[in-house]
Amino acid sequence: MKTVVNLTQQTVLGEIESVLDTYPYHPYQQAFAIPDLRQELIAFVLNRIPCLFYTISEGLPLDEAEKECLLNYKRPRSPLEQQLHVQNLIHQGIYSIFKDKSDWISHHLCEKVQPGLEPSHWFG
């Protein structure tokens, strides 16, 4: 039995959360809370970096193909360099998506009525 773990995707998801926390709630965090836009941002970043998959075998050593795959994976010089690269890609993705979809985002975010501002149905 083998389990495949996508280390890159987990790292990117965490970095997206961290980077979005530095942006204002409206419109950035609010926009990327929309599942389609969040997926687009994830895809933007993942399509621009190499993915590292690691196979965990229960009680068995890595086979030769798995060793070759791990040895040929080109890592950046340092974890900090890799983190900064991913963060930069996230900022680029946010900018690109907002630029390409500004009308859609604006329309979608303006559609939502804030509960405190909605007229009450209690009064006839």
Image (cartoon, rainbow, N blue to C red):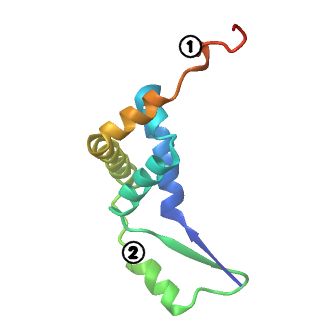
Image x and y of residue 18, in percent: 48, 39
Quarter of the image for the C terminus: give it.
Answer: top right
Task: Please say if 48 is above or below 3.
Answer: above
Task: Please name whichever residue, 98 or 67, is drawn nearer the observer in this view of the structure.
Answer: 98
Name the residue furthest top. Answer: 123
First of labels 1, 2 by sequence position: 2
Neighbourhood count class around disc 2 (C-alpha, 10 Å): few under 14, some 14–19, many 20 upward? few
| Quadrant in which residue 77 is drawn | bottom left
Q: Which residue is mark 2?
A: 73
Q: Residue 41, percent across and down?
A: 41, 51
Q: Which residue is mark 1?
A: 117
Q: In the displayed structure, would residue 31 be above or below residue 12? A: above
Asked whether residue 46 is in view, the answer is yes
Residue at (48, 33) in percent of width and height: 30
| Disc 1 from disc 2: Cα separation | 53 Å
Tell me, yes or no, if residue 23 can be seen here: no
Q: Is residue 37 left or right of residue 2?
A: left
Along the viewing direction, whichever of 27 and 110 lies nearer the viewer: 110
- Do labels 1 and 2 touch, CB within 8 Å? no
Identity of the amino acid at label 1? Answer: Leu
Task: Note whether 112 is above or below 95 in the view shown.
Answer: above
- When the figure is inspected, residue 102 is found, relative to residue 25, above or below; the finding is below
Which quadrant is home to the N terminus? bottom right
